[in-house]
Amino acid sequence: PYYSQSARRRPGQPTAVEIAVTWLAYEGASPLATASLRLLGDREAEHLYEVKRVYVHDEHRGRGLAVAALDAVERSARALGVTRLFLQTGKLQPEAMGLYERQGWHRIPCYPPYDADVLGVCYGKRL
């Protein structure tokens, strides 16, 4: 498995300790896009990180902000010495799935707690 075995439930809200970095794009005082890097846990002395909350405000989609968000989070992960990343999305989000695949992410078996979600789709990427 890609993630240490844990309770099979959706994770709670990320805590400040778990969030390694959050990327935000602003125009003036308005946030346009975001993405975060969350520490999932440790396995065999390796920190495992998950990309979370990749979101672009509806009015600003199609401007490359999701790609910029992913790139920024990946750069931050590399700076932390992370060698692979994980993320979860859903089958009802084909635009997100297409984005991740275009950016070099590969589908992997879903890891706990997402493996119990029949609509869940998980991706991994080596950095």
Image (cartoon, grey):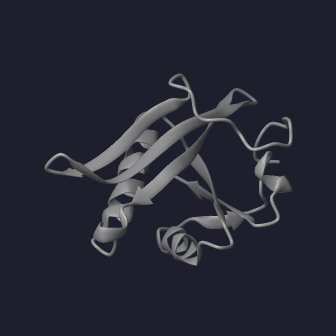
Q: Is residue 43 above or below residue 110?
A: above
Q: Position of residue 103 (x, y in %)?
A: 47, 68
Identified at 58% across, 49% down, the residue is: 85
Q: Position of residue 119 (x, y in %)?
A: 76, 67
For this orientation, the residue located farthest to the left is 28
Q: Position of residue 91 (x, y in %)?
A: 69, 72
Q: Is residue 123 left or right of residue 116?
A: left
Q: Position of residue 107 (x, y in %)?
A: 68, 67
Q: Is residue 38 above or below residue 63?
A: above
Identified at 29% across, 68% down, the residue is: 60
Q: Is residue 8 above or below residue 103?
A: above
Instruction: Answer with the quarter of the image where residue 58 lies.
Output: bottom left
Q: Is residue 71 left or right of residue 51?
A: left
Q: Is residue 126 left or right of residue 20?
A: right
Visible in this render: residue 47? Answer: no
Visible in this render: residue 75? Answer: yes
Q: Nearer the viewer, residue 91 or 37?
A: 91
Instruction: Answer with the quarter of the image where residue 78 lies.
Output: top left
Identified at 82% across, 54% down, the residue is: 115
Identified at 71% across, 39% down, the residue is: 11
